[in-house]
Amino acid sequence: MSKYLSSDFKLGIICGGQLGKMLGLAAANWDVSTHVLDANEDCPAAKVCNEYTKGHHTDFDAVYAFGKKVDLITFEIEHVNIEALKKLKSEGKAIFPDPELLETIKDKGLQKLFYQKHNIPTSNFELYENADQILAAIKEGKLQYPFVQKSRTDGYDGKGVAVIQSEKDLELILPVPSVVEDAVAIEKEIAISIARNQKGEMALYPLVEMEFSETANLVEFLSCPANVSESIEKEAISLAIKIAEALDLVGILAVELFLDKQGNLSVNECAPRTHNSGHHTIENNYTSQFEQQIRAVLNLPLGSTKMKSPAVMINLLGEDNYSGPVYYEGFEEIMQMEGVHPHIYGKSTTKPFRKMGHITIVDDSLENAIEKAREVKEKIKVISR
Ligand code: ADP
């Protein structure tokens, strides 16, 4: 371990959004030197990492040159230039999670095929090259409403997802290679994060429950622990372990699950990185998801994921109709509330529904935390003035 502390060792982080920033902050606790690659010099992580390199994460040359400068590469986003990572790996660079794992996950089509191959429950699906093929399948009676179409690559936060309930939604169909899957009658959306190091040691976080905002397609309220039966919890844990082992994960992986109205659990998707559904772990667990990612990629013992108290996390999104330099209205008011921990990512401008920060609310009782979270949501507004 000591070789990483206060030394010349450089941990490279690809992309410097809020996840990169929180990763950089966790690394700073141990004086592990961080170096971030991002196209925007004003990105949140540039302010907290030791070094910043300008470059786009999808650009081969930028990723390759960055990789040459650091000792170990990890990332906060899936859409990284895989060819550059593969070349770096072939030259001996340590990259965690592995580029091959990333290649499978970043393409929602390959991800679904992976679940199918490993008998991991997921909604039935077909792969399509373009919109015409989908329309033809409907016409021929091979595809029935309702269904969900997902762009195979580059989607995030619901962008790249079209829910097609009936013929009137057909104009929403995306003109890209996609996965088309059965619409699940969702009772609850839940998530579980799992970390694994090179020794194969694993650590699982308590299950969380997410409520999505229909307008923003982002998590509105996340509560921990999830209100599910013990058998669902066990099933979620064993699915997460099965996926992490089959992927030979080194790092942290968030597994998003659907619990349907019949009580069946299925995997929606995975993200091989820290995740919005784990932000509350900073205040709420013995080891945050960010510290855990560092432990996992450096092959250190994993930290305890034990929960300190119930918690709720809300995303701080830019208000609709406001764009420009950001102002956080009501910030001082929420600071007076017990157990309320705001995180401001440091993006200088706001736009409608942009993720500008998050707030974790901890309390001895989940009901109180939920109540307080609703109050916080009323009080704080992300605007421009
Ligand atoms: P993203 O990667 O952009 O977050 P997701 O695959 O998580 O996209 O989908 C976004 C949201 O769309 C999910 O959280 C869920 O609410 C809804 N959704 C996705 N797939 C399905 C499905 N098969 N059935 C019903 N709803 C779905």
Image: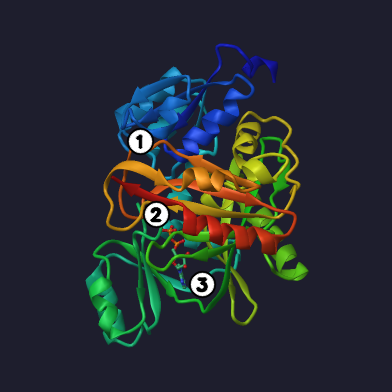
**Secondary element type, mark 1:** loop
Q: Residue 134 appears in which quarter of the rendering?
A: bottom left
Report, in whole angstroms, how far the alpha carbon at label 3 lies from the one at label 2.
19 Å
- First in sequence: mark 2 vs mark 1: 1
Quadrant position of ligand 1: bottom left
* Residue 13 drawn above or below residue 214: above
Q: Residues within 10 Å of mark 2 (few under 14, many from 20)?
A: some
The residue sitting at 63% across, 76% down in the picture is 264
Amino acid at dot 2: Tyr
The residue sitting at 75% across, 47% down in the picture is 308
Q: Which residue is mark 3?
A: 123
Side of 149 relative to 336 (left or right): left
**Secondary element type, mark 2:** loop
Which part of the image, by quadrant, shows the C terminus?
Answer: top left
Q: Is mark 3 within 8 Å of ligand 1?
A: yes
Q: Residues within 10 Å of mark 3 (few under 14, many from 20)?
A: some
Q: Is mark 2 within 8 Å of ligand 1?
A: yes
Report, in whole angstroms, how far the alpha carbon at label 2 lies from the one at label 1.
15 Å
Q: Which residue is mark 1?
A: 57
Amino acid at dot 1: His
Report, in whole angstroms, how far the alpha carbon at label 3 lies from the one at label 1.
31 Å
Q: Nearer the viewer, residue 147 or 100?
A: 147
Amino acid at dot 3: Ser
Q: Which residue is mark 2?
A: 156
Mark 2 touches mark 1? (CB < 8 Å): no
- First in sequence: mark 3 vs mark 1: 1
Residue 85 position, x and y percent, is 42, 33
* Residue 32 drawn above or below residue 313: above
Side of 354 relative to 308 (left or right): left
Q: Nearer the viewer, mark 3 or mark 2?
A: 2
Q: Nearer the viewer, residue 366 or 222?
A: 366
